[in-house]
């Protein structure tokens, strides 16, 4: 009987140690997660998800909610560390591996979309881009709509990719209307963040495609050159815009020569 008790005790202790090890491993993987309570106490945790009412964090017995009303409201009151695999998946997006990137990024967006962490915002924009590139326009619209509800100040960042979807369906006027607000916010911007450079670069690239589709080559050329000259920091968009600008220049050269002869 005593022997049986010792075996059961050893198993129980071993289970607790295993759970503790798993929690410690998860903590190590996401080092940097924390929040401050209104009492001033800092809680270093693994944040597992969030919604409009609660921030959820990992405990040995499962996710525990912490109401936002209990967390300090000022800047720096919480932090969500970038998750493993995000950098590789984002590089995959730029490399055209859209389905593979979605498999990594979409579950993260579903958990953390309400949190205005810069890497989360970048992930959501990348998801909309992936769906658009894969011609999954309904999915792109759904993610963008939810993002707008969760983080309205960031919604302009997904509009260029939604406009790509509209342009791909020859809905050029709708795409131009969708991009009007983005183009407006670019006026007077002298110092850009990488996110802004990508947003504006993609926006004017797509505007160029829309005007080209409508047969207005001069406006299209102007938009392409705007991307290459002003928003060259987004190398991918700038290269594509330059290629399209060069093609349009060749197309417009005979017209310009005939006008000069007259």
Image (cartoon, rainbow, N blue to C red):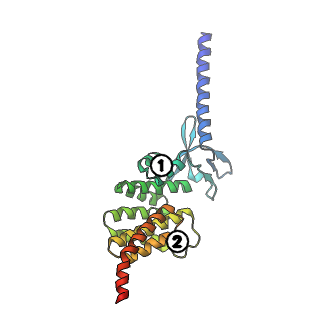
Q: Mark 2: give few (<14), some (14-19) or many (20+) Cα within 10 Å.
A: some
Q: Which image quarter holds the N terminus?
A: top right
| Picture disc at residue 200 | none
The image shows residue 7, relative to residue 118, as above or below, that is above
Q: Which image quarter holds the C terminus?
A: bottom left
Q: Which residue is painted at 40% across and 76% down in the image?
A: 219
Q: Secondary structure at mark 1?
A: helix
The image shows residue 8, relative to residue 177, as above or below, that is above
Q: Secondary structure at mark 2?
A: helix
Q: Circle 2 sits on which residue? A: 230
Q: Nearer the viewer, residue 80 or 200?
A: 200
Residue 257 coordinates in the image, percent (x, y): 37, 83
Residue at the limit of the structure toward the left, as seen here? 170
Residue 125 coordinates in the image, percent (x, y): 47, 57
Q: Mark 1: give few (<14), some (14-19) or many (20+) Cα within 10 Å.
A: many
Residue at the limit of the structure toward the top, as seen here? 1
The image shows residue 17, relative to residue 25, as above or below, that is above
Foreground: disc 2 or disc 1:
2
Q: Circle 1 sits on which residue? A: 105
């Amino acid at each position: 009987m005593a022997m049986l008790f010792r075996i059961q005790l050893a198993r129980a202790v071993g289970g607790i140690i295993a759970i503790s090890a798993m929690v410690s491993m998860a903590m190590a993987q996401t080092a940097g997660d924390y929040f401050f309570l209104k009492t001033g106490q800092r809680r270093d945790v693994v944040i597992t998800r969030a919604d409009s009412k609660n921030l959820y964090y990992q405990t040995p017995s499962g996710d525990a909610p912490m109401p936002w009303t209990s967390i300090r409201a000022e800047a720096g009151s919480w932090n969500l560390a970038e998750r493993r695999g995000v950098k590789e998946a984002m590089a995959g997006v730029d490399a055209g591996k859209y389905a593979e990137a979605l498999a990594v990024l979409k579950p993260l967006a579903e958990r953390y979309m309400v949190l205005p962490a810069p890497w989360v915002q970048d992930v959501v924009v990348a998801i909309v881009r992936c769906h658009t590139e894969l011609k999954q326009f309904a999915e792109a619209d759904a993610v963008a709509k939810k993002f707008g509800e969760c983080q309205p100040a960031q919604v302009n960042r997904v509009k260029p990719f939604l406009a790509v979807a509209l342009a791909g369906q020859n809905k050029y006027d709708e795409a131009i209307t969708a991009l009007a607000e983005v183009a407006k916010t670019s006026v007077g911007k002298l110092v850009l963040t990488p996110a802004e450079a990508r947003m504006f670069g993609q926006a004017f690239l797509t505007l160029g495609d829309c005007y080209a589709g409508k047969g207005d080559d001069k406006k299209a050329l102007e938009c392409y050159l705007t991307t290459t000259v002003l928003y060259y920091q987004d190398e991918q968009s700038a290269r594509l815009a330059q290629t399209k600008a060069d093609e349009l220049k060749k197309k417009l050269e005979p017209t310009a020569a005939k006008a000069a002869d007259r």
